[in-house]
Structures are given as structure tokens and as C-alpha cells.
Image (cartoon, rainbow, N blue to C red):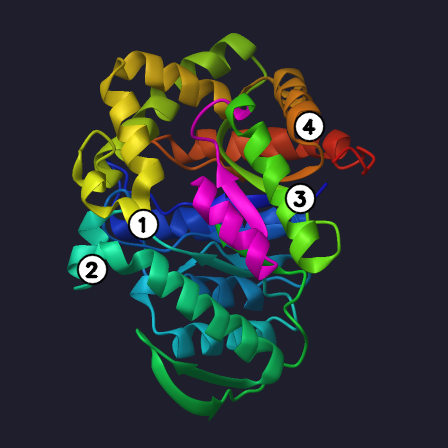
């Protein structure tokens, strides 16, 4: 079972941006010695929700300070980036890291980020579909080209040239059923964040695996599940911390993505799933929504976390894990202790789970 550290770059009310980056770098550089397989870095812009405008640049620094851990931009948000630059950046990262780069592609969800980039959010699905094919084909052929309608790209060679295939190490990061369907069609692995109880996505994951096999004649890679996590020796204290910091992060998600707004109804072609999510959330209480979110993410002493992951495996079959420990205004020392305890007590057990339950 592959386990990844997810760097979130969330603003903290008591820290400067300099301190936020110092903390994220310190955690990322510790991950290799603790036994994590990959460092993942988000792309977000402009606000305290998260600010990593160039995840490939961040990971290139990590690459220079490490030797074996893989580097995973999770993800390049294609509607905000020229596909030529995405292909160039991931190729550069692969060269600088000695072949340790992993490609992550995403579509974006926050209206405020689309507006600041002067992009029409309603075009995001079409832009993603078009750009993703361009990038994936370029990484295999060494040449990028496109006929539009959004990206009319004359044929150009990537330099430095890709020196190995990205097949088997390319993913789509998203939450909606439509995104996971696109991942299957394009031959991408899929990553989903813990937004609601995992019982609610069992059929969706099954359809992804069936669609992947139908399109490509082979077994889909394991799903990556993304969690915010508090791990503590004292299970009761872990719950207390989770009810503060998971809630802080949950509220930031609601605000950043405007998940209680009805603006998704204006873009049903691209965001029908989120229009339904917003309507459902407006029909219940914030407390009820938070309890569902809390149950989908990781918290507890090591035994509880192992049990949570074992239950998830029963539901989803084989999966991989991305965990964030630095989020929701948590104290950095608490984040470090959580990461260390997880690495010492949980990682050895879950990495020994046998494959083959998909």
C-alpha cells in the first residue's frame, strides 16, 4: 500500500506566509525518512485556503533534498495553465528528480480562482478534456500539438525530452463522479478526497474500475483517497483535536468553494454534481454535514486509524492513501507529532497489507 504526504499550504492565523512555507518544507523533507512513498503538493492561489501557485517548483526543491521519495503535483489545474507549460514542468521535474515525478491533473472548483485567472468556469470541463489529451500525448511522443477549440497549438517539441513514459504514474485529482469517469477513459489513476462517508462512493469506484478495464483492457490502479488526519496516543484527545482542526478546515472548504451557494446551477454542464451537493447541504445543518466529513477523514490513536483504514479497504478494495497533517490552524508541533506517530505505528502495519482485494 503506497502512502503519501499531502502538503496543503493552508494559511494559519498566527503565522506569516514565510513560516507556512518553512513548515510545509520541513514536513516534506522529513517524509522520506519516515517511510512515505510520495510528497504531494496542491495547486491553489490567492487566499488563505491554500497558496501554492507552482507545485512543480516546490517539489523541485524537495527533489534536490531527497533521493527516493516520489514527487506528485496534485494537481496541475489545467484550465489555469497552458498545456505546453504543464508538459514542460512535469518533464523538468522528472529530469531534476531522476525519474521520480508523478503527474496529477485537475479541473478546479473555486469560482474566485477562475475569476482571478480571467477564466470562464463553465468552460472548465471542455478545457480539461482538451488539455489533458494534449499533455498526455506529448509526454509519450515528445511533441505537443492541438487543434482547438480552446488550445490551438502548433506542433512543438518538448525540451528537455521526456525520457520515460508517464503511463502508470498519471492521475486525475477530483471528487465528482464525472471526473472519475474521465480518469477511466483517459487511462488515469484517480484520487478522491474524503468529503462524505466512503460508503457513498462504493458504486462510483466500482464503475471507475469497470470503465477503466473496458477502455484499456487492464486493471485500474488503486484509488488514492485524500484525508486530513490527526494521530495521537490518546484517542479521546485525538477526537478533541479533530473536532477543532477538522472543523476549521471543513469550514474553509465551504467558504472557499462556496458550497452553500447556488452558482453551480448556472454551470450544470460542468458542475452538475456540485449543484446537487450544494442543494443537499442547504437542506441540512452544518453540524450534520461536518459529522459526515469527520467520519470520512482520519483521526484517533494508531489503532483507531488502522481500523478506519481497514474498514475503508473492505468498502473500496485496494487503495492508496494521501494524508495531510498540517491544516485547520493546527500547531506545527502537533502536526509533527501526528505525522511521526502515524509513521511509527500505522505505516508499518498498513504497508504490509496484501494486495488483491479490489
Point out the frontmost of discs 4 and 3: 3
Residue 313 has which mark? 4
Tag 3 residue: 210
Tag 1 residue: 270
Give me the C-alpha separation between circle 4 and circle 1. 30 Å
Does the rendering let one see residue 3?
no
Image point (70%, 51%), residue name: 213
Give me the C-alpha separation between circle 2 and circle 1. 11 Å
Where are the magenta residues, as a range? Answer: 174-198
In the image, is residue 147 part of the stretch drawn in magenta? no
Give me the C-alpha separation between circle 4 and circle 3. 18 Å
User: Is the residue 319 above or below the residue 297 in the image?
Assistant: below
Judge by depth and name the residue closer to the eye, 148 or 320.
148
Image marks 2 and 1: residues in contact by CB distance under 8 Å: no
Image point (42%, 18%), residue name: 292
* Mark found first going from the N terminus, 4 or 1: 1
**Label 4 SS:** helix
Residue 120 has which mark? 2
**Label 2 SS:** loop
Amino acid at each position: 500500500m503506497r502512502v503519501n504526504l499531502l502538503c496543503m499550504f493552508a494559511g494559519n492565523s498566527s503565522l506569516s506566509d514565510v513560516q507556512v512555507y518553512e513548515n510545509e518544507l520541513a514536513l516534506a523533507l522529513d517524509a522520506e525518512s519516515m517511510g512515505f512513498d510520495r510528497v504531494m503538493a496542491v495547486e491553489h492561489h490567492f487566499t488563505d485556503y491554500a497558496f501554492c501557485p507552482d507545485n512543480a517548483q516546490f517539489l523541485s526543491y524537495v527533489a534536490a533534498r531527497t533521493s527516493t521519495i516520489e514527487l506528485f503535483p496534485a494537481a496541475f489545474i489545467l484550465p489555469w495553465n497552458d498545456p505546453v507549460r504543464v508538459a514542460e514542468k512535469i518533464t523538468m521535474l522528472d529530469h531534476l528528480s531522476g525519474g521520480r515525478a508523478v503527474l496529477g491533473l485537475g479541473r478546479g472548483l473555486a469560482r474566485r480562482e477562475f475569476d482571478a485567472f480571467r477564466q470562464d468556469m463553465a468552460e472548465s470541463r471542455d478545457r480539461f478534456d482538451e488539455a489533458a489529451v494534449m499533455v498526455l500525448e506529448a509526454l509519450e511522443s515528445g511533441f505537443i500539438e492541438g487543434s482547438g477549440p480552446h488550445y490551438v497549438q502548433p506542433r512543438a517539441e518538448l525540451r528537455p525530452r521526456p525520457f520515460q513514459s508517464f503511463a502508470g504514474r498519471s492521475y486525475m485529482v477530483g471528487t465528482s463522479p464525472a471526473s472519475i469517469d474521465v480518469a477511466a477513459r483517459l487511462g488515469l489513476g484517480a484520487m478522491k478526497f474524503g468529503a462524505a462517508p466512503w460508503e457513498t462512493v462504493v458504486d462510483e469506484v466500482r464503475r471507475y474500475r469497470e470503465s477503466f478495464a473496458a477502455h484499456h483492457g487492464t486493471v485500474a490502479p488503486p484509488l488514492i483517497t485524500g484525508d486530513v488526519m490527526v494521530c495521537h496516543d490518546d484517542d479521546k484527545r485525538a477526537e478533541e483535536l479533530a473536532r477543532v482542526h477538522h472543523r476549521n478546515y471543513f469550514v474553509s472548504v465551504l467558504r472557499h468553494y462556496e458550497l452553500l451557494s447556488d452558482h453551480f446551477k448556472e454551470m450544470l454542464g460542468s458542475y452538475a454534481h456540485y449543484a446537487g451537493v450544494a442543494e443537499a447541504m442547504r437542506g441540512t445543518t452544518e453540524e450534520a454535514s461536518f459529522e459526515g466529513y469527520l467520519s470520512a477523514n482520519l483521526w484517533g490513536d494508531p489503532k483507531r486509524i488502522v481500523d478506519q483504514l481497514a474498514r475503508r479497504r473492505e468498502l473500496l478494495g485496494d487503495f492508496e492513501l494521501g494524508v495531510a497533517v498540517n491544516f485547520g490552524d493546527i500547531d506545527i508541533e502537533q502536526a509533527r507529532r501526528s505525522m511521526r506517530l502515524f509513521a511509527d505505528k500505522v505505516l508499518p502495519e498498513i504497508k504490509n497489507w496484501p494486495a488483491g482485494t479490489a
